Amino acid sequence: MNTNNELRAVLFDVDGTLADTEQDGHRLAFNAAFKQLNLDWHWDIDLYGELLQITGGKERIRHYMEKYAPAALNKNDLTDWIISLHKTKTKYFESLMENGSIPLRPGVARLIHELRQERIRLAIATTTTMENVTALLKSTLGEASIDWFDVIGAGDIVPMKKPAPDIYHWVLNQLQLTAQQCIAIEDSENGLKSALAANLPTLITVSGYTRLQDFSGAAAVLSDLGEPSQPFTKIRGTFDQQWVDYQMLSKLINC
Ligand code: XBP
Ligand code: MG
């Protein structure tokens, strides 16, 4: 194994990694869209945790219909209907973000600022939509932060969503970097599988819905990125640091 790779870029997942957006963000947005369309669907916390196995909001809606509301599948414009329902959901999610209802997770802002100072390139590789990414960045880091990311790979830009590696391949190609020069930061098993399939070293910070998932192959598994005043809890990995910084990420890509 080559052990002198130089860290050139950090590829951040969004949902569950930058912010814990699923339970009190996306889930509420889905339910608000169902209500607006007079659907008697309600995704409670437990059901949403089950549905999160399917990445992509449109794919998740279709999966829900197949399993719990099959009668609703017999629309002759089903695909367009799902797209329209998802657009409504995205509008609700954007307004939740504009209200500042979901903060960044511990250590995220600190690490982003530090990486910028170290001239390490930043990128995003996410299953959610570009609209949701920009809404979250604007509400937490300010409008200018969108330009801090050299590449933002989001949603339908690729044909196959996580756990397929497509989004990470796309981002690496846009960065013109090799996987060995980068590290992915993820929160879920689907995200880890996607990043590993693209040969990316991957750091996991578990989130509300993912803490019991299988993170085999991760470079390290932590409670979060940590702060000097609020060290992370180490779940798996052999290192002494107590918060994630540029030096720790540089070591992790040479493990
Ligand atoms: C998590 C997802 C997304 C969100 C919902 O994305 O799977 O589908 O749950 O967002 P990430 P959309 O890769 O950032 O963890 O409804 O826009 O898909
Ligand atoms: Mg995620």
Image (cartoon, helix red, strand yellow):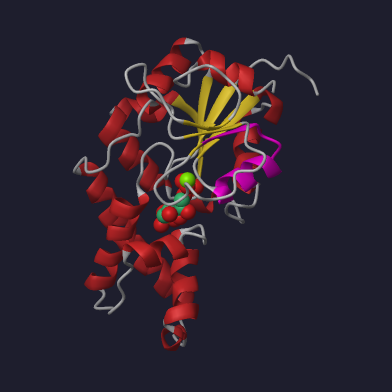
Q: What residue is shown at x 31% (from left), y 41% (from top)?
A: 135
- The residue at the far top in this view is 118
Q: In the picture, residue 138 is in which quadrant?
A: top left
Q: Is residue 132 above or below residue 106?
A: below
- Is 198 within the magenta? yes
Range shown magenta? 189-204
- Is 231 within the magenta? no
Q: What residue is shown at x 33% (from left), y 68% (from top)?
A: 43
Q: Is residue 38 above or below residue 27?
A: below
Q: Is residue 34 left or right of residue 224?
A: left
| Number of numbered markers | 0
Q: In the picture, residue 140 is in which quadrant?
A: top left
Q: What residue is shown at x 59% (from left), y 36% (from top)?
A: 171
Q: Is residue 169 left or right of residue 210?
A: right
Q: In the picture, residue 90 is in which quadrant?
A: bottom left
Q: What residue is shown at x 29% (from left), y 59% (from top)?
A: 29
Q: Foreground residue, 54 or 214?
A: 214
Q: Foreground residue, 205 or 14?
A: 205
Q: Locate residue 185, reporting x and y percent.
A: 53, 34
Q: Locate residue 194, reporting x and y percent.
A: 63, 46
Q: For the C terminus, which image quadrant?
A: top right
Q: Is residue 230 above or below residue 158?
A: above
- The residue at the far right in this view is 1
Q: Locate residue 234, reporting x and y percent.
A: 50, 30
Q: Locate residue 189, reporting x and y percent.
A: 57, 49
Q: For the N terminus, which image quadrant?
A: top right
Q: Foreground residue, 152 or 238?
A: 238
